[in-house]
Amino acid sequence: MANEAKPCPCDIGDKMEYGGLGEEVEIEHIKAYVVNPSSVSEKAIIVIQDIYGWKLPNTRYIADLLASNGYIAICPDFFVGKEPWDPNQDWSTFQEWLKDRKATHINKEVDAVLRYLKEQRGAKQIAAVGFCWGGVATHHLALQYPEIKAGVSVYGIIRDTDDRYQLKSPTLFIFGEKDDVIPLDQVTVLEKKLQEKCPVDFQVKIFPGQTHGFVHRKREDINPNDKPFIEEARMDMLNWLNKYI
């Protein structure tokens, strides 16, 4: 069943700059962007990129925001050195580009990140947050990794596996009403099936008038009419994480 998360005194990043507060590190066979909170923490969040890759300022900004709320935040290169999608590319080639960048084929990288967080950063409670491609990956982790204690999947869902509703960790799904990538009928089916089959807590939330990418949009790209919804979605993300780890 879906329960509301308790509010927390969170920083939603409305005054933060897109400077990049962390550092890049090598973790076994991959690189990652890591941000530490201001005080020692045993809680870590894996921030999972969209199709534009681990270096996108928008995604690193979310990692910075999570660190400002007391979490170790890590944004690994889940494409493992392969080029991210270029918005100038021909979209007719997208499925071909995606073939060797499947969001459900990341277990080797996830295992390396988990080892790093536990052994080198002292993390004892770990969650995941992902956007678009990373939202699909977060859904995947919620199905495969019970040690990841919570997930926030932002405009991303698995559409094609029989067990996709059997979540092992509490997951918040965030969608925009006007998302051309994920039609509302798919969101309706997701919520209905989760109500029938999901053994853990979940929430599906749709934000009125919002389009794909709204939650991790850069400040200068935010329409004033959209700002309250973006701030609410970020607060929901933080409240969900605060509730479960």
Image: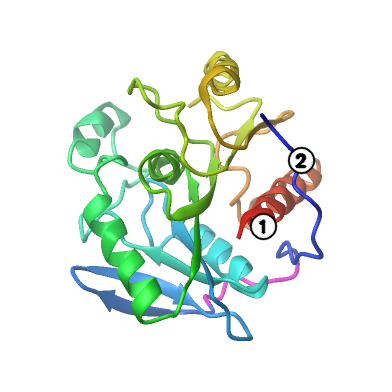
Residue 176 vertical placement versus 150 (above, below) = above
Q: Position of residue 150 (x, y in %)?
A: 54, 50
Instruction: Judge left or right: residue 104 versus residue 37.
Output: left
Does 16 appear in magenta?
yes
| Residue at mark 1 | 220
- The quarter of the picture where residue 210 lies is top right
Reply above or below: 143 against 38: above
Give how far across and how far down residue 196 sits, in percent: 56, 17
Which is more N-terminal, label 1 or label 2? 2
Q: Quadrant of residue 12?
A: bottom right
Q: Which mark is residue 4?
A: 2
Q: Is residue 6 left or right of residue 123?
A: right
Q: Nearer the viewer, residue 196 or 13?
A: 196
Residue closer to the observer: 56 or 170: 170
Mark nearest the camera among 2 and 1 is 2
Residue, x 49% and y 46% (percent of image)? 131
Say what amino acid the circle numbered 1 marks. Answer: Glu
Label 1, residues with CA under 10 Å away: few <14, some 14-19, many ≥20:
few
> Residue at image x 53%, y 27%?
198
Q: Amino acid at mark 2?
A: Glu
Q: Could you tell me if the residues under marks 2 and 1 are in contact, i.e. CB atoms within 8 Å?
A: no
Please state the extent of the stretch shown in magenta in the rendering.
15-20
Q: Position of residue 157 (x, y in %)?
A: 46, 31
Question: In whole angstroms, how far apart are the C-alphas of marks 2 and 1?
Answer: 31 Å
Q: Residue at x 39, y 45 (%)?
A: 141
**Above or below — where is 130 with respect to 81?**
above
Q: For the residue carrying disc 2, how many other residues have a C-alpha within 10 Å: few (<14), some (14-19), or many (20+)? A: few
- Report helix, strand or loop for mark 1: helix
Secondary structure category for the residue under label 2: loop
